[in-house]
Amino acid sequence: MPEPTLSDIHVDSALTDFSLAYFQDEAKFVAPSIFPVVYTPVRSGKYFTYDTAELMRSDAKKRAPNTESAVRGYKLSNDSYHCEVYSIAVDVSEQETANADPALDPEQDAARVAVNDIRIAMDRVWTQQAFSTGIWGTESTATWNTSTGDPIGDFQTGILAMLEATGKRPNTLVLGAESWYSGLWTSTAILARLPDNAPRIVTPEFVGGLFGFDRVYILDTIEQTVESSTGAPAFIHEDHALLAYVDPNAGLREATAGKTFVWSGLVGGGGGVRTKRLEMPWKDAMPRVEVDAAFDFKVVATDLGYLIKNTVS
């Protein structure tokens, strides 16, 4: 007499407490945080700039009794910003939602996919506008993953160069993943500065304290550039190091390397990104989850950034 098989007495079903998805951690997407945010109700506009050379000189002279003081002027100009709009959407059909297994939430999944997509795009744009060659006023080349690498000397050169040119000391360090993990993380020169009783591992906090950087960012987000699982993802950011002076509260008559202009009149105050749900009854009640971003990662002072490029050979 035939007996039931294992497949007869158990029908495989999807787990309700586990699923696999390679979403990148939201905390990794730091591009919108590096430059302070300016919310603007309009898409584009201008801001005033004071001539740097005029503010670096002195025309003061000795003044004799009953004589007029020396008189000077200063130059004023302006620059502009323009927030580009990026958008991505995922459609979710009513039938998909109704038929989904308990472990799935098609609308929630759609929102997560769309937000992840726009964050990758924002990191890519920041790299193009602020973390590439030919942008900052001063660039140098270094190799940190060799026995002769000298990141301490390279940082010292960059700090002195900016301080002498602008009077501002770099307070922000931005590192590509390879510059960190293949460069500073294993640098014998940096490791030698660790206290004798400390774990033999270099941390962003230690590097920040060693060189006086208030903030240290490690850029390790990745992107797959082809729509195929056979393609290999790669780091979005290059193996560069950026020393910058960034004033997180820069307002009137203040200096900062860059600003993140956000078109709040379109996307509100959520850091340049908004998510919305659109009903589309003409498509079988299909909701569309749409994410928009409207921003301009603007380098406003090229002399407040010092780029050390191609730090890993």
Image: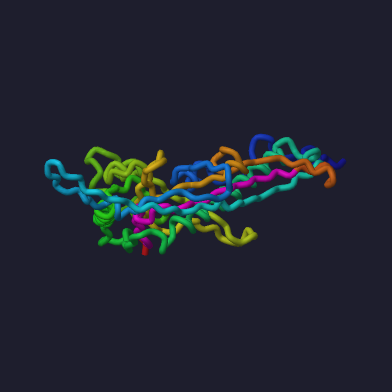
Foreground pick, 279 / 313: 279
User: Residue at coordinates 32% horizontally, 53% vertically from top-left?
Assistant: 52
**Which segment did they paint magenta?**
288-310
Residue 179: which quarter of the image? Answer: bottom left
Q: Residue at x 40, y 51 (%)?
A: 49
Q: Say which residue appears at 48% left-offset and 56% top-offset.
A: 127
Q: Is residue 189 visible?
A: no
Left or right: 311 in relation to 10: left
Instruction: Judge by depth and name the residue closer to the eye, 288 or 130.
Output: 130
Q: Residue 18's spot in the image, x, y percent?
A: 64, 38
Dominant secondary-structure state across the stretch colored magenta: strand
Q: Quadrant of the N terminus?
A: top right
Asked if 128 appears above or below 174 in the picture, the reply is below
Residue 238's quadrant in the figure? bottom left
Residue 159: image location, x then y, percent? 27, 52
Q: Is residue 230 left or right of residue 202?
A: right
Q: Quadrant of residue 107?
A: top right
The residue sitting at the left extreme is 64
Image x and y of residue 110, in percent: 68, 44
Q: Residue 51 colored magenta? A: no
